[in-house]
Amino acid sequence: MSVRIIVNYVILICWLAFWAYWFISARKAKPGQGLSGRYIGIRVVIAIAVVYLVRSIGGHSHPLTSGPVLIGVGLALFAGGLALAVWARVYIGRNWGMPMSRRDEPELVTTGPYRRVRHPIYTGIIVALLGNALATSLWGLIAVVGLGGYFIFSATREEAFLAGQFPDTYPSYKHSTKMLVPFVF
């Protein structure tokens, strides 16, 4: 079995474990409501990710990803991104919700991974997808761009809601942290 096939299967198993954890832990979240249009965006993102993953597991890779250094960097980014998303998900606890959802009785979490980035779950998933693309197929960069755009849109909508929910604390928190990339954006 080739290294590429092993890498593809390791990534697939990690994604399956990640999403299984995600859906199981979602049951513990506070009740809330989604914003209009939320489900359409999520379906599009999931469809892009599924097509990409099936394509990458099938062995259709870009020739630039055949080098061991790029595969290693990709795997490191993939693992680090998933770890950041899980850490942020554990840290936010019951306040977590699907993109652009509103929790009943929300709490503003500003510590842990939220100390440097306002949306570390989004950052972690984007970094994991970027690593996935580098390790398997550069076609995955299309999914990274699509998901990145969706997460920026979601973050902007969520921040407007949070500014209304926490008018005394959210503006200073927003001013002292970046949206997705520490020290940059």
Image (cartoon, rainbow, N blue to C red):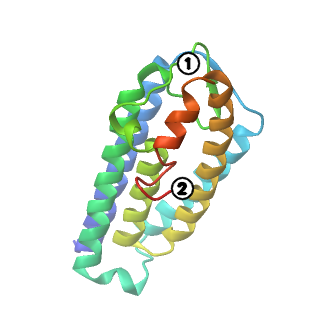
- Look at label 1 and name its amino acid: Pro
Q: Position of residue 67 (x, y in %)?
A: 27, 83
Mark 1: few, some, or many residues within 10 Å (few <14, many ≥20)? Answer: some
Residue type at mark 2? Val
Q: Is residue 90 left or right of residue 167?
A: left
Residue furthest top as drawn: 105
Marker disc for residue 115:
none
Assess disc 2: are there few (<14), some (14-19) or many (≥20) residues with their C-alpha within 10 Å of its C-alpha: few
Pair 1/2: label in front: 1
- Residue at image coords 64%, 22%: 165
Q: Is residue 72 left or right of residue 108?
A: left
- Residue 108 is left or right of residue 163, and the answer is left
Q: Give the quarter of the figure containing the N terminus.
A: bottom left
Q: Quadrant of residue 98?
A: top right
Report which residue position mark 2 lands on. Answer: 50
Would you say residue 118 is visible in this rendering?
Answer: no
Between 171 and 151, the one nearer to me in the picture: 171
Q: Earlier in the sequence, mark 1 or mark 2?
A: 2
Q: Nearer the viewer, residue 8 or 30?
A: 30
- Which percent across, then down, holds residue 179? 52, 48
Tell me what residue is drawn at x 38 percent, y 85 percent: 64
Q: Position of residue 168 (x, y in %)?
A: 59, 23
* Residue at mark 1 to residue at mark 2: CA–CA distance: 32 Å
Which residue is disc 1 drawn over? 106
Q: Secondary structure at mark 2?
A: helix
Considering only vertical position in the picture, is 43 above or below 137?
Answer: above
The residue located at (44%, 55%) in the rendering is 181
**Residue at position x 61%, y 51% in the image:** 152
Q: Nearer the viewer, residue 53 or 159?
A: 159
